Image (tube, rainbow, N blue to C red):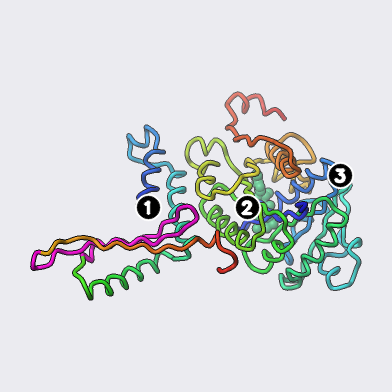
Amino acid sequence: MEEKVITVTSGKGGVGKTTTTANIGSALALLGKKVVVLDGDIGLRNLDIVMGLENRIVYDIVDYVEGRCRLRQALIRDKRAPELYLLPTAQTRDKSAINPGQMVQVCDELRKEFDYIIIDSPAGIEQGFQNALAPADRVLVVTNPEVSSVRDADRVIGLVEAQQKGPVQLIINRLIAARVKKQEMLSTQDIMDVLSTEIIGIVPEDEAILSSSNRGTPVVFNGKSPAAIAYRDIARRLIGEDVPLVQPQPTSWWQKLFGRTE
Amino acid sequence: MSASASSELQHLKAMNFFERLFGRRSSAQTAKQRLQLVLVHDRAEIPPGVLALIKDDIIAVISRRVNIDREHVVVNVTHEDKMSKLLVDIPLLRNADGQAAGRARGEAQRPNRRTTSPSS
Ligand SMILES: Nc1ncnc2c1ncn2[C@@H]1O[C@H](COP(=O)(O)OP(=O)(O)OP(=O)(O)O)[C@@H](O)[C@H]1O
Ligand SMILES: [Mg+2]
């Protein structure tokens, strides 16, 4: 089966699921794929903000599920890529507004038109997570190189495997190479040893992420910031290109002095 | 080997020269060790506190029949190759009549939840 529906989840909150969804979705669209990014965080929508599309929302997925609009009307077109869309969620409803069966149904509709449907899962392992997981063909678990986040990732990987929603791949986000080198932070190898799950990308801690979310422009749209490069690489791995995994290296004193190659 | 002992070993190997010199481990190593321990319990679905209760139960049951060294009973969970194991090590005390002392050892195994279908 084609792996069209990709769910981005984590267990622990605030590790970078929404940032990852926005950037991977945008990067896939920039590679010429027809993509929809779907906000699975009912009641706490953020994907619209991170994508910079918040002012264009009229209808959302709950409106569609409850029959107030057609699916097309809820989809927001992002003009920065040839074929990129956002399906926003409702801000004033709670997780129970949609059930896993309805999520599968919505995604089956979207599968007809899109190459990729990227779902931003809410934190936690309750209904919102189950909703995001139900239609998944492929699951990306985001973790930070930090004890509690890796522990929660292990729990989530267990739940995903128990429901036979594979393959599961790991994204290590916010890695700081200099601190890994000083043995102040878990390394990629440490996390691999502990989780024994394939790693599909390592995204460094990057100042550009904050300014990009300030502006509502995912980093992959402009520039060569380290996170942008990492997210583009992940997108290329997702479409099956063989892009070797590179370990982020600390920036040397002369790179700091003369500015990075941006 | 118990999980704590094996991670301890990995740990020492990973310590660099200066850490060995000053007897201090890096915080990343501490993080990894803590993670490995907590994940063993998470995956086996036996919290550390329950393990202490199991240990008390075992001591009570076994000591009804044989003389055991209660202080040195070890009950541990390990996790290898997607199997969780409960390892019990019970030193026997030499009886008053001079009978040979030995050890009762037990192993209980079950596949880890990660390899089973939706049971948990
Ligand atoms: N690689 C990175 N470098 C620097 N900052 C980052 C990076 N990734 C994420 N962040 C920041 O971390 C914060 C949390 O990110 P994000 O909202 O994507 O997490 P989340 O997992 O979706 O959170 P929630 O669980 O609340 O939905 C944001 O402020 C974001 O800008
Ligand atoms: Mg989020």
User: Looking at numbered disc 1 in the image, what kind of residue is underneath it?
Assistant: Ser
Disc 3 element: loop
CB at mark 2 closer than 8 A to ligand 1?
A: yes
The residue at which mark 2 appears reads as A15
The residue at which mark 1 appears reads as B4
Q: Looking at the picture, tell me which residue is in the foreground, A167 or A224.
A: A167
Pinpoint residue A209: horizontal percent, then vertical percent.
Answer: 70, 44
- In this rendering, is residue B76 above or below A207? below
Is residue A230 rendered magenta in the image?
Answer: no
Pinpoint residue A191: horizontal percent, then vertical percent.
Answer: 53, 46
Please state which of the two labelled residues, at mark 1 or mark 2, is closer to the viewer. Answer: 1
Disc 2 element: loop
Identified at 53% across, 55% down, the residue is: A151
- In this rendering, is residue A21 above or below A71? above
User: Looking at numbered disc 2 in the image, what kind of residue is underneath it?
Assistant: Val
Question: Marks 3 and 2: same chain?
Answer: yes
Q: Is residue B35 left or right of A56 when viewed as pictured?
A: left
User: Looking at numbered disc 3 in the image, what kind of residue is underneath it?
Assistant: Arg
Q: Chain of mark 3?
A: A
Q: Chain of mark 1?
A: B
Specify the segment rendered in magenta: B69-98
Q: Work out how far the residue at label 3 is from the one at label 2, CA to CA, in angstroms.
A: 26 Å
Identified at 56% across, 37% down, the residue is: A177
Is residue B96 rendered magenta in the image?
Answer: yes
Q: Quadrant of residue A231?
A: top right
Question: Marks 3 and 1: same chain?
Answer: no
The residue at which mark 3 appears reads as A80
Q: Looking at the picture, tell me which residue is in the foreground, A135 or A68.
A: A135
Which callout, 3 or 2, points at the residue further toward the start of the chain? Answer: 2
Q: Is residue A220 left or right of A145 when viewed as pictured?
A: right
